[in-house]
Image (cartoon, grey):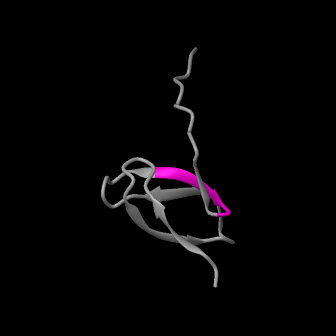
């Protein structure tokens, strides 16, 4: 049987409603936390979860 792990929120550390297995791969996945009500982009491979930092929007200069 494959190892299954709960995905924890990178902001508050609580369990989310998502479980991943060892063979799960996620890219640019919007993870929503029901406790802190924040959405974070993550990537997951081999049960390792990495937070993807988005660059801040820049204002257009003329």
Is the C terminus in the top left, top right, bottom left or bottom right quadrant?
Answer: top right
Who's the residue at 45% across and 59% down the image? Answer: 8
Is any atom of residue 2 visible in this view?
Answer: yes
Does the magenta segment cover residue 26?
Answer: no
Report x, y in % for residue 40: 48, 50
Location of residue 43 (image quadrant): bottom right
Q: How many marks overall?
A: 0
Report x, y in % for residue 32: 42, 58
Q: Nearer the viewer, residue 32 or 13?
A: 13
Q: Nearer the viewer, residue 47 or 24?
A: 47
Location of residue 27 (image quadrant): bottom right
Does the magenta segment cover residue 43?
Answer: yes
For residue 11, above or below residue 2: above
Location of residue 21 (image quadrant): bottom right
Who's the residue at 65% across and 69% down the image? Answer: 24
Give the magenta part as a residue range. Answer: 40-46
Report x, y in % for residue 39: 43, 52
Who's the residue at 57% across and 33% down the image? Answer: 55
Report x, y in % for residue 4: 56, 74
For residue 17, above or below residue 36: below
For residue 52, above or below residue 37: above
Which residue in the rendered view is the most extreme toward the bottom?
A: 1
Q: Nearer the viewer, residue 48 or 58?
A: 48
Which residue in the rendered view is the most extreme toward the top?
A: 62
Q: Main secondary structure of the magenta part?
A: strand
Which residue in the rendered view is the most extreme toward the left?
A: 35
Is the N terminus in the top left, top right, bottom left or bottom right quadrant?
Answer: bottom right
Is any atom of residue 27 visible in this view?
Answer: no
Who's the residue at 31% across and 52% down the image? Answer: 36
Q: Is residue 10 left or right of residue 53?
A: left
């Amino acid at each position: 049987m494959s190892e299954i792990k709960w995905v924890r929120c990178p902001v508050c550390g609580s369990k989310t409603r998502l479980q991943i297995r060892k063979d799960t791969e996620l890219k640019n996945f919007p993870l929503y936390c029901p406790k802190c009500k924040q959405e974070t982009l993550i990537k997951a491979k081999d049960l390792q979860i990495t937070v993807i930092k988005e660059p801040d929007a820049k204002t257009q200069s003329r």
